Image: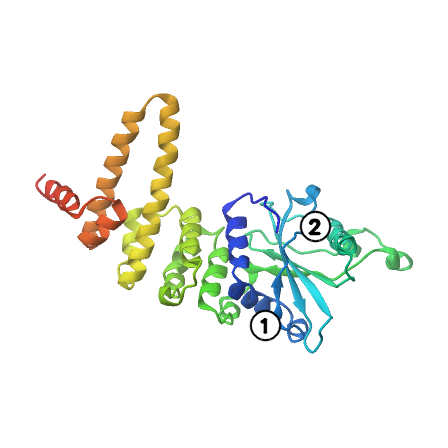
Amino acid sequence: MNQHIHNPHDKFFKAMMAERELAIGFLQFFLPEEISRMIDFERIEAYKDSFVTEELKEIFSDAVFRCPVLESDTSSLFVSVLIEHKSYPDKMVAVQLLSYLANAYQSQLKSGEQLHVVIPMIFYHGVEHWEYSSLRQLVPGLKEEFRRYIPDFETLFVDLARMSEDALEGIKLMLLRAAVQLQRYSGRPDLLMEHIRKILERIDFEKDNSRNFSRLLFVYFFEISEISVEELATLIEDLPLQTKSKIMTTYEQIEKKGFEKGIEKGIEKGIEKGIEKGIKSEKMRLIIQGYTKGLSIELLSDISGLSMDMVQKIIREHQNQ
């Protein structure tokens, strides 16, 4: 996998595909049945290298998997899941994909191994409608006599926004389903807020893996939603305490990082005191609003980093105003 990750969507996609269980579930769901049934998923491996060239790094990120074929000790294929960095559909992506596939086969030759089939899958979750066009479709007025000279190939194209909710219900892993649904609504804040509660309810912290992917899921949600602490408290008030605590702690950590960035900029501008005052005021605001929404003193202490005595003092002073 290449290291050039340009935005939160790419980072989240890469994190999702780095989780073996999620990656296998993803491939089992999105690969065509005639391909999926031939793969030995118990022996699948994430490929350590990327097939993305320097010229393509501004266009694609990829997650490559070596997939052994069932009932064979030597036969395997590569599945390359690609996500585009552009904010709009690129009509000419098949040309770029041709370059990608050429490098994929050249990389195999350079490694000294036999050639394996490379199946490309474009994973698109943008809002704008994208009709994928093959190389033959891109050549205007192509005559039948010339068609056989076009290096054509099949591409799996997943247009997530155009998939139905009923179709996505077929994803068996709840954490994967939540991750895919978040990406589906990432460009539609209105629909995201409409579905987010249902998405959060599907996350089981007791069964979460050692890498704590659920936290990354929350980070991604906060990065794409611009939700306020008041909206968040209302949204999660009926969720289990463990889920509620996890969400609020993650929210606080993200807010803290934002404050730290503000501090760095403030120091450069010579306004350290103003920033410190702003941080204190923001923590007080979070405590008061969280308490109003029914969060416990203990939880407010955890997410603010202040002692329980200090939290109680802030609440008392607010009530006496």
Q: Quadrant of the C terminus?
A: top left
In the image, residue 281 sits, relative to residue 102, either above or below, namely above
Closer to us: 39 or 10: 39
Residue 143 in view in this figure: no
| Residue type indicated by callout 1 | Glu
- Residue projecting furthest to the left: 320
Q: Which mark is residue 93?
A: 2
Within 10 Å of disc 2 (Cα), the crowding (few <14, some 14-19, many 20+) is: some
Residue 45 in the image, given as x and y percentages of width and height:
61, 64
Q: Which mark is residue 55?
A: none
CB atoms at circles 1 and 2 under 8 Å apart? no
Q: Which residue is mark 1?
A: 42
Residue 44 in the image, given as x and y percentages of width and height:
62, 67
Mark 1 vs mark 2: give the one in front.
Answer: 1
Residue at left offset 37%, top offset 45%: 254
| Residue type indicated by callout 2 | Val
Residue at left offset 67%, top offset 70%: 68
Residue at left offset 41%, top offset 50%: 219
Residue at left offset 54%, top offset 68%: 25
Residue 271 located left or right of residue 22: left
Closer to us: 297 or 86: 297
Q: Quadrant of residue 226?
A: top left
Q: Earlier in the sequence, mark 1 or mark 2?
A: 1
Within 10 Å of disc 1 (Cα), the crowding (few <14, some 14-19, many 20+) is: few
Q: Tell me how many marks there are.
A: 2
Residue 194 located left or right of residue 288: right
Between marks 1 and 2, how big is the CA–CA gap?
32 Å
Q: Secondary structure at mark 1?
A: helix
Q: Secondary structure at mark 2?
A: helix
In the image, residue 10 sits, relative to residue 81, either above or below, namely above
